[in-house]
Amino acid sequence: MAWRVLLRRKDVHTGLLNLAFRAGGTECFSSGAVAKPSQFIHCNKLQGAANCTIFKHYPIRNFHAGVYMLAWSRKKEDVVGLKAPKKEKRVRKETRTQPPVEAPYVAPKPKMTIKTSPDKTVEIFDGMTLLDLSKRSGATISALQSILQDLGEKVESEFDSISIDLAELVAMEIGVNIKRMHTGEGTVEPRPAVVTVMGHVDHGKTSLLDSLRQTSVAAKEAGGITQHIGAFVVEMTSGASITFLDTPGHAAFSAMRARGAAVTDIVVLVVAADDGVMPQTLEAMSHAKVANVPIVVAINKCDKSGADPERVRIQLGSEGLLLEDMGGDVQVVEISALSKLGLDKLEEALLLQAEIMDLKARTDGPAQAFVVEARVDRGRGPLATAIVKSGTLISGQYIVVGAEWGRIRSLRDTAGKVTEAAKPAMPIEIEGLRGLPMAGDDVVVVDSEERARMLSQGRKKKQEKDRLRKIDEGMTEEAEIAEETPERVEMPIIVKADVQGSVQAVTDALRSLNSPQVFVNIVHVGVGPVSEHDIDLAQACRAYIVGFNVRNPPSAITLGATQANIKILLHKVIYHLLEEMGRLIVEKAPGVAETQISGEAEVLNIFELKGRSKSKGPDIKIAGCRITDGHFSRSGTMRLLRSGDVVFEGPCASLKREKQDADTLDKGSDCGLVIEDCDHFQVGDTIQCLEQVIRKPKFISTQSGAVRIEC
């Protein structure tokens, strides 16, 4: 069937309506051309336009050509603001016969790599140039400039000076340790001496300070033993003031005594006249020698019966301490802290030594101080006790203490009074830190909060790198130990204490209890009482909680710990703490299985059972023995000895006393013994009973206070 396409013409508003269809290159006109059905076509009634439906998606072109319509459209274009866009001239694209030109590859600029030296220490100072820093650290000038550019600082010349804070930030990025060298320029004035009292435990250090300042501190300490460092100023009878540091005498607080020697000018070595030189006395001497600090010896308890000061002098001289009595320069004073005997002579000796040293310090400019102790107060937050070495520390300054920073909210002296500034050799309590610093950290004064944040973040980042490096080294050591010892258990511990110094001392003491059988893992440390967070953490890792010199936790926390089966060990004297932890470690240790001789017996007679039935077994020999040492067990292994040589070794087949079977027989018992597959007994032979026992490690505590686990 053929479809006919008609071209209709109709005047619409005296316009001409033209319809033209182009399909597949074939035009259809009114002349009667016929289109195929497969091509298209259906046309409805036309009313001013052509409504066409396409079945095969052929292109359709509709033309609306009318005189009036064209005129109207031209007027519309003339309306102001409604200009039709001009048609751009269409340009035919050239056919490319050649491939497109590719741009040459430009490799990205390689990032400058710097070799880190974690064991290298670089001295930095204010006003140093990039050239100085490059020579000291080993990094190139361009690398240092790139780091400064990342920090927001632009230094073009290698001879441009930078601040000490910028030098520290750059050094931390390089990966080297730094040592700040503070300038000595400024107004220099005499300052009081900082004196540290050292010596063995219970030799009378705190009692001596009590007599000097007319107070009673020793009575407040647990067991009469100082557990942390105390710093205070004592006004002497002559009018001069001396800053004293009291350090603990126990072996666990070695690091605290070392920090005391680092910030002191003179060391008073207290030795009891009735006790003599002890291990911690020698340790205090070594700390003073390493710090290059002069020593004044105070022989205490000279009024007690049995006191022998001359013996103490001989002992100190034999240890290499050159006393004045022996031609040296170390002053020796005989005192008694309780009866206040010889305190005036000790004061004269200290003032004389300070005068010889001619102690002076810079009083203007930024302060240089060291943290002696740190703690957390419930109402005031983190508090740090520091001693100013030089400069003046002013309230309101931005400071960086170790890896923590803050703005000084208030300064308090040893009497608790608020002060606006702290001069050299003055112990003060700093309030306003964002976190708790470590005892021994230095206090750095910076210009702005931004610089304080940058320094704090840089130091924390470096501490984290050092911590991870130590963990890797420790894991390597632990792997080597694990290869040697097949079985080793872990003992996780959470440590809480009242001050930061005690936390570090207790942690070091507990880590010294590590053994090949038990690994003491300190999972968390903190300052303050035991909290719910500690209970949750202990429950997660099944850890013990050790509280040193902290108050008892609330009943809710204690109940939660009991329900979770978590042990909380609270102590105020470190002796007792280490003893209890030592017992727990020994109990937790798996021990080592070893063969041990449990008893010996002598063969007195031999009995034979012959003619036994097949159901009862072959003939056997029974050794009639008397146990001469230890005990015999039927489950043990029997060893037959003849003239000291091993003849046979095997399990026990039967052990009887008279006619009754016995599992264990003690010394002095007569018994009949049968060893499996052994029938060559002789009278006079010796039989040993061997047993497998689990040998536990031993907790050893010495008189000096040092503890260890011996496997």
Image (cartoon, rainbow, N blue to C red):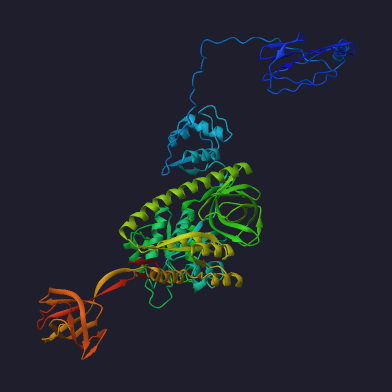
Q: Quadrant of the C terminus?
A: bottom left
Q: Is residue 288 visible?
A: yes
Residue farthest along the right direction in this orientation? 13
Q: Position of residue 143 (x, y in %)?
A: 48, 31
Residue farthest along the top direction in this orientation? 31
On screen, residue 643 above or below 296? below
Q: Left or right: 651 with respect to 77?
A: left
Q: Nearer the viewer, residue 604 or 476?
A: 604
Q: Is residue 349 visible?
A: no
Q: Left or right: 91 with respect to 84?
A: left
Report the number of discs.
0
Q: Position of residue 526 (x, y in %)?
A: 54, 60
Q: Quadrant of the N terminus?
A: top right
Residue farthest along the front direction in this orientation? 1
Q: Residue at x 51, y 35 (%)?
A: 128
Q: Position of residue 532 (x, y in %)?
A: 59, 64
Q: Left or right: 701 with respect to 691?
A: right
On screen, residue 102 above or below 643? above
Q: Position of residue 148 (x, y in %)?
A: 54, 34
Residue 335 in which image quadrant: bottom left
On screen, residue 227 above or below 639? above
Q: Residue at x 23, y 86 (%)?
A: 667
On screen, residue 603 above or below 331? below
Q: Nearer the viewer, residue 130 or 612?
A: 612
Residue 700 in which image quadrant: bottom left
Residue farthest along the bottom direction in this orientation? 658
Q: Nearer the viewer, residue 215 or 679?
A: 679
